[in-house]
Amino acid sequence: MWFRIVSLDRNLCLMLGLTQGSFDRSMATGTAFRDDTPMGRLERMHCTLASRMLERNESDPCANDFALTQNLDWELQKAAKSMPSRWWLMPNLDSVTDDPQALFLDMGRLFNQLYHYNLLIQLHLPYMLRSSAEPKYEYSRMTYVNASREVLSRFIMFRGYNRNNFCCRTVDFFALMAGITLLLAHLDSHRFSQASNLLAHQYLSDRAMIEQAQVNMKQISRVNGDTLSAQSADLLHKLLAIDSETADGSGLPVRIARQGVVSREMANAQPPLSNGQPYAPMISMHNTDSSEATVRDHSSGRFEGNASPRSMTEANYNSVDRVNGPPAQLTSRYQDTVSDTLLQNYQDPGLTAGVDDWAFQGVDMALFDSIMRGLNNGNSSETRDNGP
């Protein structure tokens, strides 16, 4: 029972960006571990690895973060190999509908697969914004992209199987985070020519998966009156629109408000660079209260509305930035603005808040905080760890 409580606590802490309640990692050792089922041992290894990931996230960024990330990645690979290769096939729930015991086992298998891939996403997120500028982080980029695809494909299957009898909020949040992560990866990839864009061939199929996940969320909302699914679907819809508008390299400011509200404005179209490549998309994110009606006039630099939004980050990548990575002043802005202005609004999120108030409102900010963590030590020297 203690192991299950700790495991759930760590799962929620990863989603919400909270501090873990216990540092106990004994569940992956001793008699209890040896006598458990193969899937039970995988769950115990997941629990201890989640604790180490939380410990990394709770500490100040340092030069050893990348080596630790590689070591944790190796441990996740070792945990995955503890199960037969066929175990990792996506379960076919339709084939076991009439067998309650088989359905129960396949559900457990599905949820553990989702949790494993979510751990991979959480592990490599800090290197999302750095991978495009520094080739050594390309492994992290491809890992979280592929893990996001695995999560989305299983979410689509699960929600297509039966959307009425199961209330699995964690699965819904895994899918939302995977959709956001995959879209951000493609937004970043638009800055490159087709010849150097490793995600180009998967772009349409990835969009199709995200669009189908959005449709499933809308259906859940319509059938069950689920406000959170409706908000998640709306968020993905707006991010998909942003992706469509920036696919040609045009600039696009983005405003991300509290409670997951996203608004966007098209910037003036930019001419191509001298080398024929389009300008990289400029993404400007702002955090505003949902009650504020704020519109920015980019031509004059003025804000109109009840209050000025608090700038989360502004990044205008040019041809130099694509080679050298994020500038130092951008890293400083990430640190100062996010930690001092935004995250204080998401401390101790109200898990008992009404659904109309976006309970679990820390999920979106925890995701962006994890992404920006990698920029805090962007100038540090890091060494590669090939595992034990």
Image (cartoon, grey):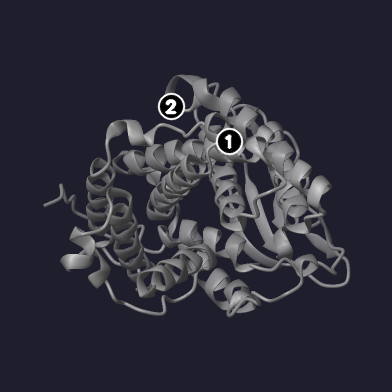
Q: Nearer the viewer, residue 317 or 201?
A: 201
Query: Which residue sits furthest left?
Result: 388
Task: Report the residue at 40% width, 58% height from top.
Answer: 374
Residue under numbered circle 2 = 198
Residue under numbered circle 1 = 97
Pointer 1 with pointer 2, Cβ within 8 A: no
x and y, in percent, of residue 156 in the image: 61, 36
Task: Report the residue at 36% width, 62% height from top.
Answer: 50
Snapshot quadrant of residue 276? top right
Label 1 packing within 10 angstroms: few (<14), some (14-19), many (20+): few
**What separation in Å lies between label 1 and label 2 (alpha carbons)?**
39 Å
x and y, in percent, of residue 124 in the image: 38, 50
Q: Is residue 107 visible?
A: yes
Q: Nearer the viewer, residue 59 or 297?
A: 59
Q: Which sits earlier in the primary sequence, circle 1 or circle 2?
A: 1
Q: Is residue 140 left or right of residue 239?
A: left
Q: Please name the amino acid that badge 1 sits on.
A: Thr
Q: Please name the amino acid that badge 2 sits on.
A: Leu
Q: Is residue 276 left or right of residue 254?
A: left
x and y, in percent, of residue 380 in the image: 28, 60
SS class, disc 1: loop
Snapshot quadrant of residue 278? top right
Snapshot quadrant of residue 248? top right
Q: Is residue 257 above or below residue 2?
A: above
Q: Is residue 179 left or right of residue 6?
A: right
